[in-house]
């Protein structure tokens, strides 16, 4: 499985944009880039995913480098509720007889200051 | 919508006792998973079930057994609990898209297990 590297922690201020980086230099052409986040005392929740093009949804934007060796999760206007651990994951392709296995690393702990 | 429901939410066991963590999903998903999360750590995959009738080992399967009872339910059993199994356990499910890994994984709220 392709490996991801994220900073252990980041800090930002409320109502400011946040850019969470992820390096995945061994990514293959078929690897999707997934982001999940885990709020305190909760299970992880899906944030966004993409393959090559930048992606937007109601929660965040995902900017993918042209060579796909890195990506950035963008929270456009952070709130206190966005304080969480953010995981960047490259799941292997699902096989016909297999299943999509997500391997969670340590992630980035995001602190939002009021 | 209930989503993924785990029971119990909290449990304290003594070393050597057995117990079963229950997980049920109401989203008609075919794939289900059990993860554990130790304090300050990421999630580690214990077992997964790609579809009803199949189960496979993940990263840390030792000391655990699973049963995919039907499409909705996937249980995790500790036959003889050990203090090293003190952790938070998360069940998850997804609709597995054939040949594509774009399925979103839905997690339960977790079951906090302490083994004394």
Image (cartoon, rainbow, N blue to C red):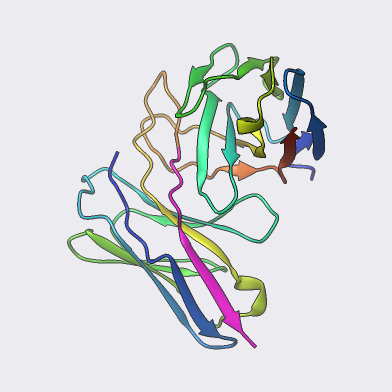
Kindly tell me whether residue A75 is visible in this rendering.
Answer: no
Q: Residue furthest left?
A: A67
What is the quadrant of the N terminus of chain B in the image?
Answer: top right
Q: Residue at x 69, y 36 (%)?
A: B27
**Does residue B55 appear left or right of residue B110 in this picture?**
left
Q: Report the span colored magenta.
A: A102-114
Kindly tell me whether residue A49 is visible in this rendering.
Answer: yes
* Position in image of residue B108 (x %, y %): 70, 42
* Position in image of residue B107 (x %, y %): 64, 43
**Does residue B54 appear left or right of residue B73 in this picture?**
left
Q: Is residue A37 above or below residue A28?
A: below
Q: Nearer the viewer, residue B19 or A67?
A: B19
Q: Is residue B51 above or below residue B40?
A: above
Q: Is residue A28 above or below residue B81?
A: below
* Position in image of residue B103 (x %, y %): 49, 41
Q: Residue at x 52, y 22 (%)?
A: B61
Q: Quadrant of residue B55?
A: top right
What is the quadrant of the C terminus of chain B in the image?
Answer: top right
Q: Quadrant of residue B18?
A: top right
Q: Nearer the viewer, residue B16 or B103?
A: B16
Q: Is residue B20 above or below residue B103?
A: above
* Position in image of residue A21 (x %, y %): 35, 68
Specify whether residue A107 is painted magenta: yes
**Does residue A21 appear left or right of residue B13 in this picture?**
left
Q: Residue at x 70, y 14 (%)?
A: B69
**Does residue A90 appear left or right of residue B93 in this picture?**
left
Q: Nearer the viewer, residue A73 or B20?
A: B20
Specify whether residue B93 is painted magenta: no
Q: Residue at x 81, y 34 (%)?
A: B12
């Amino acid at each position: 499985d392709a490996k991801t590297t994220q900073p252990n922690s980041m800090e930002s201020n409320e109502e400011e944009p946040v850019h969470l980086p992820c390096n995945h230099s061994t990514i293959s052409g078929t690897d999707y880039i997934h982001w999940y986040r885990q709020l305190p005392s909760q299970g992880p929740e899906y944030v966004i995913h993409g393959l090559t093009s930048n992606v937007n949804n109601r929660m965040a934007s995902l900017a993918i480098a042209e060579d796909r060796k890195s990506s950035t999760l963008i929270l456009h206007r952070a709130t206190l509720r966005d304080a969480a651990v953010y995981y960047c994951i490259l799941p292997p392709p699902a096989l016909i007889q297999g299943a999509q296995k997500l391997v969670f690393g340590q992630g980035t702990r995001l602190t939002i200051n009021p | 919508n209930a989503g993924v429901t785990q029971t119990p939410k909290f449990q304290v066991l003594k070393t050597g006792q057995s117990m079963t963590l229950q997980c049920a999903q109401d989203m008609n998903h075919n794939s289900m998973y059990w993860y554990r999360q130790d304090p300050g750590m990421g999630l580690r995959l214990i077992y997964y079930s790609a579809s009803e009738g199949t189960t496979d080992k993940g990263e840390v399967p030792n000391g655990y057994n699973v049963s995919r009872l039907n499409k909705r339910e996937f249980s995790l059993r500790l036959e003889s609990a050990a203090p090293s199994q003190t952790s938070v356990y998360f069940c998850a499910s997804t609709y597995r898209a054939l040949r594509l890994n774009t399925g979103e994984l839905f997690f339960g709220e977790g079951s906090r297990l302490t083994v004394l």
